[in-house]
Amino acid sequence: MIDLRSDTVTKPSPEMREVIAKAAVGDDVYGEDPSVNLLEEESARLLGKEAGLFIPSGTMGNLAAMLTHCERGSEIILGDKAHTFLYEVGGIAALGGIQAHILPNQQDGTLGLEDIRKAIRMDDIHDPPTRLITLENTHNRCGGVALTGEYTRQVGEIAKEHQLKFHLDGARIFNAAAALKVNPAELVEPADSVMFCLSKGLGAPVGSVLCGEAAFIKRTRKTRKMLGGGMRQAGMIAAAGLYALEKNLPLLIQDHQRAADLARGLGGIEGLTLEHEKPPTNMVYINLARELLLNAEETALKLKDKGVLVGITGERQFRMVVHIWINDQDVEKVIQAFKDVLS
């Protein structure tokens, strides 16, 4: 089965499994797991931050950061297509008493700078205080687009001007850096905190890392414990993360090229239209023409019969995510499967 539903479906390679089996471990809640400590240090170094914190998931990483930055009754600014708003079960409200001030995401994944300025609450007794601005890079529901360092700096300047914190959901920040051909630290420099996932394009089985100033990470370590994210001999999964950063990170650009090849092949099939003629990173969003009798769900079932799994993101829309387990032959098979189903 060729699984393009997400890059979260990757499984550890035999080499990664060997590293996991040999990992040095200790009790991480006591700060005694050498593999976790090394992963946190290496993550912070890659992103130009003082410290890192290993967390079970990206959702918990975002939530822990926001709970640490904000008090109950405060407000954060984020996009209407942000992962935190759409897919994280309302955790900031349910667990943090934090209100979301939603702004429209532009097609390029950004929030309008003037929209951000206007959304910041003044010191009024009637208003919840604005405490945080958050962006997503790459931006999933905007087609996997990469936000530039220049734009991120502009948002960072607004945050500093108004004495706000700035969090970056960088679940796929290394995809953004590969696409823009820049150092990842350049893309996150203005942010007070940034979370990235090891279990997506990097191919590790589980885990994310939250990075920021040492004092912030120290406070968030306690937040992580409160959320049930304190792990014990976590070095076995941290070792997979270290392997991913060393061996799999350089391969992300190949995923982008295969996504481009996939889009090129699908774009030539009658009845299919691409959201982006050339995918910005490793995601291909594609729409079914209205004149086709099949909708997305029916098409997905027929593709499954041909050994291809795709993500349904609308009545007539798919998302396909290319990852480390997809090769050139798989791309050709997927294109042929669409041709067969839609012919």
Image (cartoon, rainbow, N blue to C red):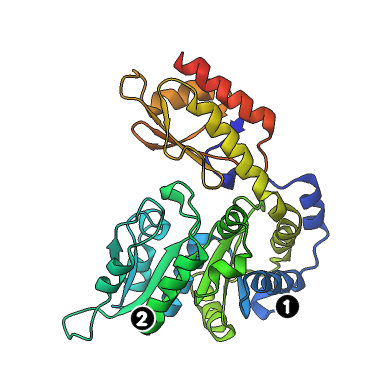
In the image, residue 87 sits, relative to residue 123, either above or below, namely: above
In primary-sequence order, the first of circles 1 and 2 is 1
Image quarter hosting the N terminus: top right
Label 2 CA crowd tier, 10 Å (few <14, some 14–19, many 20+): some
Disc 1 target residue: 32
Q: Residue at x 51, y 22 (%)?
A: 338
Question: At label 2, which amino acid type do we have?
Answer: Glu
Q: Residue at x 57, y 47 (%)?
A: 8
Figure quadrant of residue 213 = bottom right
Using the rendered image of the protein, determine whether residue 306 is visible from the camera's viewpoint.
Answer: no
**Circle 1 — which element?**
loop
Q: Residue at x 38, y 81 (%)?
A: 164
Q: CA distance from mark 1 to mark 2?
A: 30 Å
Q: Position of residue 62 (x, y in %)?
A: 47, 66
**Circle 2 — which element?**
loop
Disc 2 target residue: 71
Using the rendered image of the protein, determine whether residue 149 is visible from the camera's viewpoint.
Answer: yes
In the image, residue 212 sits, relative to residue 18, either above or below, namely: below
Left or right: residue 111 versus residue 255 is left
Q: Position of residue 47 (x, y in %)?
A: 62, 70
Question: At label 1, which amino acid type do we have?
Answer: Glu
